C-alpha cells in the first residue's frame, strides 16, 4: 500500500511507516503527481482535496489530520467512492485554552475584570462548548448561538444572532460553509460588523473567511469596534498587513497547535486508515505526551494577574503575536515551526504561596492544583 503523507504531520513516521510505503509531500505543493498511484492520502488543512488533485488517481481513502473540513470536497469524494475521515474535536481543548489566555491578556491590557463580562459563543460544538464551560466557571456571562443546534434540539438556550451581538466579547467557533440554511462565509460582513460597537471585542479562531477581513479592517481603523483577536485570516498565508496592525492580538493560525491535539489528530488518522483497510491498530502514543510539570504563579501577583502569569508561561501568545508582526511574510514557517505546547492538564499549579483562593479558577481552566 502506498500512503501519501504531508511531511509536516507530527509523528508521521511512527504512525504510518509500518502500514505501507510512504510518499511524503509538502502540504501547499501537493499535486496530482504525488497522489496518482497512492492508495491513501493523509493531509492537513492547507491541501485542497478535490477533483483537481484526485481525478484519475488510485486513492481510495483520505484522512485530514485536522478538525476542519472546508478544504475537502466531500461531495466529490462520495461521488468517486473515496472514504473520508477527519479528526473532529482533536484540538478543542487547545483552542479553548487559547481563547481563555487571550481573554486574560486583553483584560490585563484594558484593566478589565473578566468576572461579570459577557461572552457570546457562536458555534457550540467541540470548541465552543469548552470555551463556554471554562468562561462560565470564571464568572463570565455566556450567551450561546448555534442555529443548527437550536433547530435540532429546540433548546431555547441557543439564542439568535440578534440576541447575542450585544455581548462584550464575541467569539467565533463555526465551520466555514457556503451553502445550507446557515452559511458562515462572511457571516460577519459589513452589515453585521456595523452592529457592533466601540466597546466590543471580536475573536476569530474558526476560519478566516467567516469574517470579511476587508470590512473588519475598516471597522477597526474607524474605531467602530473596540478590538479584535485573530488567529485565522482570509488568504492565508498571504495576510492583510493593515488588518494585522489593527488587531489587538494576532497569531498565525496556531490556536489549535498543542502537542496533545497533534498527537490525537495523527492517531485518529491512523485509526481510520487501519479500520478502512482492515489492519490492526496497535499504536501506543503514551510516550509522546508531555510529562507532568510543576508551575507557580508570579510572585506578588494577585487574582487575574496571577492566573495570567501561569497562562503565559504555558502559552505565550504575546510572543506569538510579536513574531507574526515582525515576520508576517513567513506565516507558513511560523505556523509549521511553532512549538507544540502541552495542554493545561499536564501542569500542576503550586498554590502554596498565598494563591489558594485561585484553585477553582485554575481547575476550571483544566490545570491540576497543589495547595
Image (tube, helix red, strand yellow):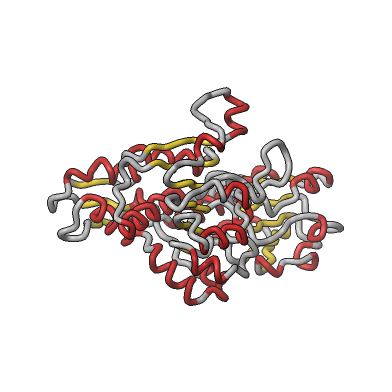
Q: In the figure, 189 relative to 246: above or below?
A: above
Residue 58 percent coordinates (x, y) = 81, 56
In the image, 49 versus 11, the foreground residue is: 49
Of 356 and 344, the residue lying toward us: 356
Taking the spot 72% from the left edge, 38% from the top edge, the residue there is: 180
Q: In x, y percent, where is residue 280?
A: 61, 45
Residue at the extreme right of the image, as rendered: 56
Q: Position of residue 174 (x, y in %)?
A: 58, 44
Which residue is at the front of the view, 90 or 110?
A: 110
Residue 64 in sight from this viewpoint? yes
Q: Is residue 223 left or right of residue 15?
A: left
Q: Quadrant of residue 28?
A: bottom right
- Count of residue discs: 0
> Could one spot residue 279 in this view of the protein?
no
Direction from residue 357 to residue 149 in the image, left or right: right
Residue with the most extreme top position: 154
Quadrant for the N terminus in the image? bottom right
Q: Please provide percent x and percent y for residue 310.
A: 28, 57
User: What residue is shown at x 34% (from left), y 45% (from top)?
Assistant: 365
Camera-nearest residue between 337 and 325: 325
* Rendered view: 156 above or below 217: above
Q: Residue at x 56, y 71 (%)?
A: 241
Amino acid at each position: 500500500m502506498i500512503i501519501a503523507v504531508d511531511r509536516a504531520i507530527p509523528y508521521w513516521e511512527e504512525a504510518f511507516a509500518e502500514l505501507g510505503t510512504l510518499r511524503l509531500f509538502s502540504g501547499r505543493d501537493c499535486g496530482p503527481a504525488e497522489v496518482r498511484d497512492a492508495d491513501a492520502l493523509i493531509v492537513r488543512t492547507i491541501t485542497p482535496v478535490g477533483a483537481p488533485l484526485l481525478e484519475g488517481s488510485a486513492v481510495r481513502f483520505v484522512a485530514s489530520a485536522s478538525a476542519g473540513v472546508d478544504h475537502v470536497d466531500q461531495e466529490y469524494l462520495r461521488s468517486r467512492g473515496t472514504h473520508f475521515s477527519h479528526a473532529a474535536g482533536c484540538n478543542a481543548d487547545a483552542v479553548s485554552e487559547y481563547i481563555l489566555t487571550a481573554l486574560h491578556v486583553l483584560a490585563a491590557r484594558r484593566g478589565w475584570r473578566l468576572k461579570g463580562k459577557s461572552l457570546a459563543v457562536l458555534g457550540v460544538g467541540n470548541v465552543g462548548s469548552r470555551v463556554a464551560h471554562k468562561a462560565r466557571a470564571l464568572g463570565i456571562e455566556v450567551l450561546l448561538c448555534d442555529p443548527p443546534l437550536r433547530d435540532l434540539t429546540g433548546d431555547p438556550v441557543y439564542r439568535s444572532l440578534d440576541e447575542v451581538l450585544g455581548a462584550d466579547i464575541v467569539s467565533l467557533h463555526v465551520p466555514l460553509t457556503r451553502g445550507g440554511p446557515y452559511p458562515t462565509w462572511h457571516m460577519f460582513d459589513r452589515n453585521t460588523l456595523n452592529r457592533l460597537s466601540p466597546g466590543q471585542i471580536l475573536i476569530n479562531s474558526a476560519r478566516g473567511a467567516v469574517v470579511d477581513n476587508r470590512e473588519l479592517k475598516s471597522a477597526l481603523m474607524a474605531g467602530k469596534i473596540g478590538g479584535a483577536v485573530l488567529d485565522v485570516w482570509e488568504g492565508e498565508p498571504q495576510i492583510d498587513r493593515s488588518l494585522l496592525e489593527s488587531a489587538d492580538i494576532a497569531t498565525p493560525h496556531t490556536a489549535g497547535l498543542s502537542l496533545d491535539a497533534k498527537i490525537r489528530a495523527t492517531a485518529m488518522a491512523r485509526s481510520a486508515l487501519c479500520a478502512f483497510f482492515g489492519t490492526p491498530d496497535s499504536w501506543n502514543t503514551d510516550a509522546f505526551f508531555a510529562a507532568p510539570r510543576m508551575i507557580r504563579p508570579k510572585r506578588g501577583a494577585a487574582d487575574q494577574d496571577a492566573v495570567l502569569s501561569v497562562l503565559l508561561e504555558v502559552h505565550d501568545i504575546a510572543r506569538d503575536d510579536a513574531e507574526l508582526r515582525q515576520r508576517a511574510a513567513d506565516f507558513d514557517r511560523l505556523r509549521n515551526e511553532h512549538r507544540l505546547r502541552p495542554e493545561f492538564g499536564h501542569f500542576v499549579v503550586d498554590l502554596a504561596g498565598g494563591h489558594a483562593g485561585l484553585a477553582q479558577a485554575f481547575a476550571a481552566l483544566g490545570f491540576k492544583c497543589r495547595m
